[in-house]
Structures are given as structure tokens and as C-alpha cells.
Image: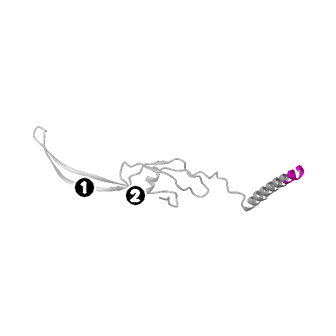
Amino acid sequence: MEVDANGKLYIVGLGKNVTLKGVETVAPNGYNKLETEVTLTPQVLETEVFKATETRYYDKDGNLVSTQASSTSSRSVEKNLDELDAAGVEVVNNAGTELPSTGGIGTTIFYVVGAMLVIGAGVVMVTRRRMSSN
């Protein structure tokens, strides 16, 4: 999943009592990837409220004789996203400390020329020793 342009992530349809672990797999350009996982607790966006009414019947001594449910109603209560944002988890990305790649073909040429000079010096030294020992 990816965050939106404001850096927020909304997941719809999770059940209650769910705990999620967030792991950053790719860091934004110029930032370090998070080393630890983040624990996320989903917030409830919509709650259903039930209201039941009943009638109770008592005898002359005040004892409950019977009850009768007369009606039940329900309605949904929805939070706005600003309320949910207040309970959100903020993940701070730190600017990267990774060093940029340096060098290139120019340094490779120096390595090759240097290696050839060392090998050439070794060959000259061996041939001079052979000539001087004869």
C-alpha cells in the first residue's frame, strides 16, 4: 500500500480488535528506509447505535411482573477523517546519509594503467636479473 499525497494511508473494511504491523519496503528518494516496524491500531470510522424501548408491568406491591419490547431503532454514527487523523501514527522519515556514488570510467582507467605499470616493472626486474646472472 502507498500513502496519499498528504502522506496518509486509509484502510477501509477492517474488523474490530485488529492490530497491524507497518513495514517500509521502499523509502522516498533521499530518505532512509525505516529499520523497525510500526504498530498500527485501526480507528473506527462508523459505529452503529441501537436503542430499544420496552414496557415494564408491575403488580400492586411493586414487583416486576413482565416486560414487553415495544420498538428497536438503530442509526450509524460516522466520525470525520480529522477526528481519525488525531489518533493516527506519525512516521518520521529522516533524510538519507547514504553517500553518492563517485568516480566512474576515469578511476577505472587509472586502476588499469597502474596495474599495467606494476606488471611491466615486474617483467623488467625479472629480465634484468636473468641477464645479469649470465
> Residue at the left extreme?
60
Name which quarter of the figure residue 116 lies in: bottom right
Q: Which mark is residue 73?
A: 1
Classify 10 Å Cα crowding around label 1: few (below 14), some (14-19), many (20 and above): few
Residue at mark 2: 12
Residue 47 placement (x, y as % from top left):
34, 53
The tag earlier along the polypeptide, 1 or 2, is: 2
Name the colour scheme. Answer: one colour
In reply to whether residue 29 is colored magenta, the answer given is no
Is 57 rendered above or below residue 131?
above
Residue 27 placement (x, y as % from top left):
56, 55
Image marks 1 and 2: residues in contact by CB distance under 8 Å: no
Give, as a three-letter code, the residue at label 2: Val
Residue 8 placement (x, y as % from top left):
49, 57
> Residue at the front extreme?
134
Residue 50 placement (x, y as % from top left):
27, 52
Residue occupying image coordinates x 10% and y 40%: 60
Estimate the spatial distance between the alpha carbons at disc 1 and disc 2, rounded to whole Å: 25 Å
Q: Which residues are magenta?
A: 127-133
Name which quarter of the figure residue 31 lies in: bottom right
Give, as a three-letter code, the residue at label 1: Ser
In the rendered structure, the answer to whether residue 30 lies left or right of residue 13 reads right
